[in-house]
Amino acid sequence: MSDEIIHNGKRLVSSREAGRNVGLSHDYVGRLCKAGKVFGHLVAGSWYVDMETLTAFVIDNERSKLQRGKNLKETLA
């Protein structure tokens, strides 16, 4: 199966390729799709993901992680 498809005019890449691009496992990318945290489409048992929503998720997740660390540091100071 191809590493990308077009679904409703959007270019979607396989969860394996998407995970490789952002440093996540393809299983985790699939779970994010299933949970509705990133846009994806299931085709023949494989998730295909919109890279824009996955990248936005990763950036927001990193931002949240940094903020939690800052808050913890202030709490412990």
Image: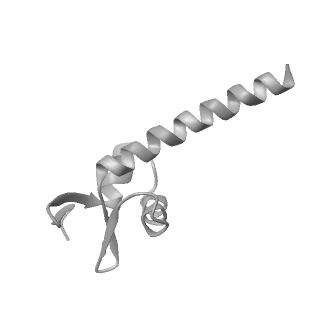
Residue at figure coordinates x 61%, y 37% from the top left: 65
Residue at figure coordinates x 49%, y 65% from the top left: 31
Where 6 falls versus 75 (above or below)?
Answer: below
Is residue 67 left or right of 71 when viewed as pictured?
left
Residue at figure coordinates x 35%, y 60% from the top left: 39
Which quadrant of the figure contains the N terminus? bottom left
Q: Quadrant of residue 10?
A: bottom left
Q: Residue furthest top?
A: 77
Residue 41 point in image, percent of width and height: 31, 70
Residue 68 point in image, percent of width and height: 68, 34
Is residue 19 left or right of 61 when viewed as pictured?
left
Where 42 falls versus 71 (above or below)?
Answer: below
Q: Nearer the viewer, residue 29 or 34?
A: 34
Which quadrant of the figure contains the C terminus? top right
Q: Nearer the viewer, residue 28 or 54?
A: 54
Residue at figure coordinates x 53%, y 42% from the top left: 61
Residue 57 point in image, percent of width and height: 44, 47
Q: Quadrant of residue 33?
A: bottom left
Q: Nearer the viewer, residue 53 or 44?
A: 53
